[in-house]
Amino acid sequence: MRMYDLIQEKKEGRVLSKEEISYMIQNYTNGTIPDYQMAAMLMAICFQGMTQEETLDLTLAMRDSGDTLDLSEIPGIKVDKHSTGGVGDKTSLVLSPILAELGVPVAKMSGRGLGHTGGTIDKLECFPGLSTSLGEKQFLENVRTVGMAIAGQTANLAPADKKLYALRDVTATVAQPSLIAASIMSKKLASGSDAIVLDVKTGNGAFMQKYEDAVQLAQTMVSIGRGAGKTTYAAITNMSQPLGRAVGNTLEVLEAIQALQGDGPEDLLEVVYTLGSLMLRAAGKTCDAKEARAMMEQVIASGRAVDRFAKFVEAQGGDGRQVLHPETLAVAEIKKPVYAKTGCMGYVKEIQALDIGTACMKLGGGRLTKEAAIDLSVGIVLEKKVGDQICAQDEPIAYVYANDRERCDEACLAVQNAFTVTDQPVEKPRCVYGCIVD
C-alpha cells in the first residue's frame, strides 16, 4: 500500500477503505508518511469530500492513534459534552456540577482558548492552586468521589488529530465538514464516556457561521458517535451575540457562579437547561425536557449546585471557599464604561460576537498561539443585549476590565463599534434553534 496511490484515488473521487484510512493515519502519526503527502490528501478530501462511512473510519483511526481512557470503574452512565466554541461560553462550568449533583458522572477533558474563543481550562485557572493536569488515577478518583473532574487533554489522546490539525491550519484545509467532525469526535471517543452531547454553535461568533453548515456538522458528528456505539445528541445554539453577559476568564467564572446560585443570564441558562436535558436523557434519568429542567432548577434553588462546584474546586487543588465568596477572585484594576455611539438611543439590533471576543483577546484575555500567556483578570461585561433598550446617552452598554489604559481605550472603541442600534423595537433572538435526538 502506498500513500501516493491513496492520494490518487481520493483525487479521482473514489471511496477509501477502512484499511486504507487506518494505514494512512497510523503511518502519518508515526512519521512514515511526510507532511507534503498528507497535505495533498487533505486538499483532495476538501475537493472530493468523504462519505459517512469514510468519515467514521477516519474518526476511529484517529481515536486509536493514541491512548483511550477507560471509565468503566466509575458507576453510572458517563456523559460528555462538547461545544464547538464561541464567545462567553461558560456552560460547562454551570452544567457539570448540576449534572454531578443529579447523579450523572462528569469526566470531562477540556481545552484552552485560542483566538477569540475562550477555553474551560483557562477559566478554571482563575482559582489559585487549581490544577487541570491530573493523572488518570486522580482524574478517575475525583469523578468517583466528587462526581466530576475537568482536566486538560493528555498529550497522547488522539495524537493524530494534533498533527493533522497543525497541518490543516497552514494548508487552508480546516473548513471541511468531515475533517472538522473527525477532529472533534476522535477526542470525544478517546475520552471514554458512554454518551456524548454536542453544542454546535452558529452565528458571527462561531466557527460555523451559517446555520446550514452548523446543522450539517451536527448531523455528521451525531452519525459518527452513533456509528461508534455511543448515544449521541446535538443542539444547534445561537452565537450571533456573546452567551451571557461576561466575556473573559475570571469574569465568566463569576457569571457561572451567579448562574449556579440562581441568578444567571436568561440566555445562558436556556442553553444550560437544553444541554442538561439532553445529558439527563442520555444518562437514562428522564426523557421529558420539562421534567429535566425542573430537576436542574431544583438543584440550583437548593444551593447544592454551587456547593458541588466548590467541592470540585477544592478536589483539584483550589480554594473552594472562593466559590462561596467570589468577590475574592481577582479582576482587572481598570473598569471603564462603554456608551453607544453619539445620538444612538433606542434598541440593540446586533452585537458582533466575534468583535467582542477579539476585543477581549487584545486586552490580554485570549491568545494568538497556544503557548501565549493570558491575563485571566481582564474582559468585558455587557450591560445590554440584543432587544434591550438604551434609554439615555449616559447609560452604559458595557464595561471593559483592563490592566492597561491604552488597551482599555482600544477595547472600548471596539465594543462600541460591535453594537448596532435602531429606533425600532427588536425581538430577542432565539438561544436554541433545535436539537438532534432521534
Image (cartoon, rainbow, N blue to C red):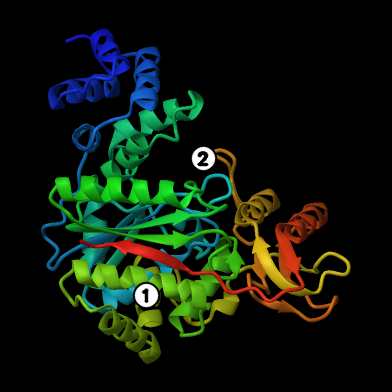
186 and 132: which one is in front? 186
The residue labelled by disc 1 is 273
Rendering coords of residue 381 (x, y %): 65, 69
Residue 224 lies in quadrant: top left
The residue labelled by disc 2 is 370
Q: In the image, what residue occupies the spot 13% across and 23% down? A: 19
Residue 409 is labelled as: none
Q: In the image, what residue occupies the spot 72% across and 62% down? A: 419
Disc 2/disc 1 C-alpha distance (Å): 31 Å
190 and 60: which one is in front? 60
Rendering coords of residue 361 (x, y %): 64, 50
User: Does residue 132 appear to the left or right of 22 in the view shown?
Assistant: right
- Amino acid type, callout 1: Tyr
Number of numbered tags placed on the structure image:
2
- The answer to whether residue 322 is visible is no
Q: In the image, what residue occupies the spot 26% across and 58% down? A: 139
**Could you say whether the residue bearing mark 1 is in a helix, strand or loop?**
helix
